[in-house]
Amino acid sequence: MITSFFKEYGDEAEEILKECTHMYCDEEVFVCAYKTHSDYILKKTNKRLDKGDTWFVYYAAGKVTKLFEIFEPQKFVCFHRLNTDKLKIYSYNRLRDYYGK
């Protein structure tokens, strides 16, 4: 799965991994993410906020529901979408409940 990440992002992959503070990889899943604040995403504020309430998932492949076992709960989960500037933000609890965790 990590091979897919490098294949999709090419030269950009190394920079993305430097930005991600949390990564997990096993035979079922590869996830790289970092914590940020929802205001930084939703309001596009330029100031950095101290307390993160959102997982910004830069890349996830495989059994993504393991995210709920691996990373501590936050208020939101935001997914980066390849080849687009659009971000998708979800309530962490609602997404977890939807996937049966």
Image (tube, rainbow, N blue to C red):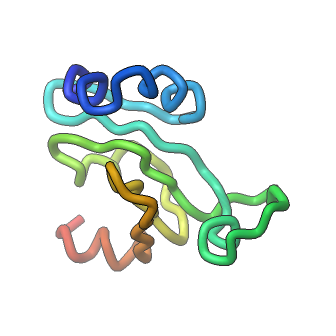
Depth order, front residue of 81/37:
81
* Quadrant where the C terminus is found in the figure: bottom left
Residue at 53% of width from left, 63% of height from top?
Answer: 74
The reply to whether residue 68 is visible in this rendering is no
Number of numbered discs visible in the structure rendering = 0
Question: Is 65 situated left or right of 9 in this image?
Answer: left
Q: Position of residue 63 (x, y in %)?
A: 16, 45
Residue at 81% of width from left, 56% of height from top?
Answer: 48
Question: Is 4 situated left or right of 25 in this image?
Answer: left
Residue at 43% of width from left, 76% of height from top?
Answer: 91
Residue at 60% of width from left, 50% of height from top?
Answer: 35
In the rendered image, the vertical position of residue 89 relative to residue 10, given as above or below: below
* Quadrant where the N terminus is found in the figure: top left
In the rendered image, the vertical position of residue 80 relative to residue 89, given as above or below: above
The reply to whether residue 90 is visible in this rendering is yes
Q: Position of residue 28 (x, y in %)?
A: 15, 33
In the rendered image, the vertical position of residue 75 relative to residue 62, given as above or below: below
Q: Position of residue 56 (x, y in %)?
A: 50, 54
Depth order, front residue of 7/28:
7
Question: Is 10 situated left or right of 61 in this image?
Answer: right
In the rendered image, the vertical position of residue 101 relative to residue 80, given as above or below: below
